[in-house]
Image (cartoon, rainbow, N blue to C red):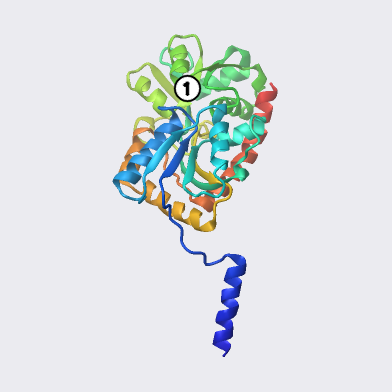
Amino acid sequence: MLKTLVCILTAIFIMATGHAAEPWAPDRAVEIIAGSGAGGAQDRTARTMQKIWKERNIIPVPVNVVNKPGGGGAISMAYLNQQGSDGRYIAVSSPVVLLNHISGKSNLNHTDVTSLALLFSEYIVIAVRNESPIKTGSDLIQKMKTDPASVSAAVATARGGMQHIAVGRIAKSIGVDVGKMRVVVFNSGSESITQVLGGHIDIVATAVANAAPHVANGQLRIIGIAAPQRLPGLLANVPTWKEQGVDVVASNWRSVLGPKGMTAAQTAWWDNALQKLVQTTEWNEDIQKNYWVNNYLGSLASQKFFAAQYEELRGVLGELLAK
């Protein structure tokens, strides 16, 4: 009798709370939303995910990439949240989802979507042309301390982006007024590097993959990387800024987000699919090729990561944009 009563009460509790819900899986095509045009950073990540999921048969339905560029990622986030609780829609994003909200460019924040994963980190390097009198990070620090206006820095593709933040944090960490530095914004990473190679700009803040070919042919020299520790291969001899006495870590990480109304069952399904993705040989080969760091976090851990990042970036960005 007691056992029967317990079963009845358990059933009532499940009905009332929604716990022990049936497992979920997509029954129609899945969309990966990329906040950049074809060939952009988020698009490339989305298409790598699409290819691996298809070839490995990890997702049992078609997977389509949908490009929603514009507004610094704001358009893709708005489109994502138009899907309500439909778990078939996910988006590849970056720190821009936080930066747009901090700067007032968008009303959507990380709390307005469902955090599904941190995929990897793309740490930012500071590089100079090989003929530059700035040979090391120490040289740059000394020059900035002596006369910050004498240093020009190239960033892409907007003020208040992670490259701008990396430069600003270096200045701030050594007690230099970030407003006195000359930061020049270019339309692409390749354009900013070209300006440095031509001797028009002193330093460039960029992704490792952008600088790597020019480092390999002897045109560029990386003087510091904004990573927690040194990276292997081409970057094995490049010191971190922390090693040089400057406490700066800055990365254009990639994340995966879902619409705000996703259920626990939908989130759990994507946790599984994303974990399988980042464990594949193909994914890790792509990570290595692009000099990224595979520091994958699932839904719960990534939610905490984004919250911490928001608070950190809010303090830095407010000061940078005020200058």
Q: In this view, does 244 lie above or below 13?
A: above
Whether residue 292 is visible to the viewer of this picture, yes or no, is: no
Q: In this view, does 190 lie above or below 170?
A: above
Q: In this view, does 155 lie to the left or right of 178?
A: left
Task: Give how far across and how far down residue 47 sits, in percent.
Answer: 38, 36
Q: Mark 1 points at which residue?
A: 136
Amino acid type, callout 1: Thr
Task: Give how far across and how far down residue 185 sits, in percent.
Answer: 55, 17
Task: Give how far across and how far down residue 20 sits, in percent.
Answer: 52, 67
Task: Give how far across and how far down residue 42 sits, in percent.
Answer: 45, 33
Q: Is residue 15 above or below residue 240?
A: below
Task: Tell me the residue at 57%/27% (across/down).
Answer: 71
Question: Badge 1, how many Cα within 10 Å: few under 14, some, many 20+?
Answer: some
Whether residue 160 is visible to the viewer of this picture, yes or no, is: yes
Task: Tell me the residue at 67%/34% (across/down).
Answer: 315
- Labels in figure, total: 1
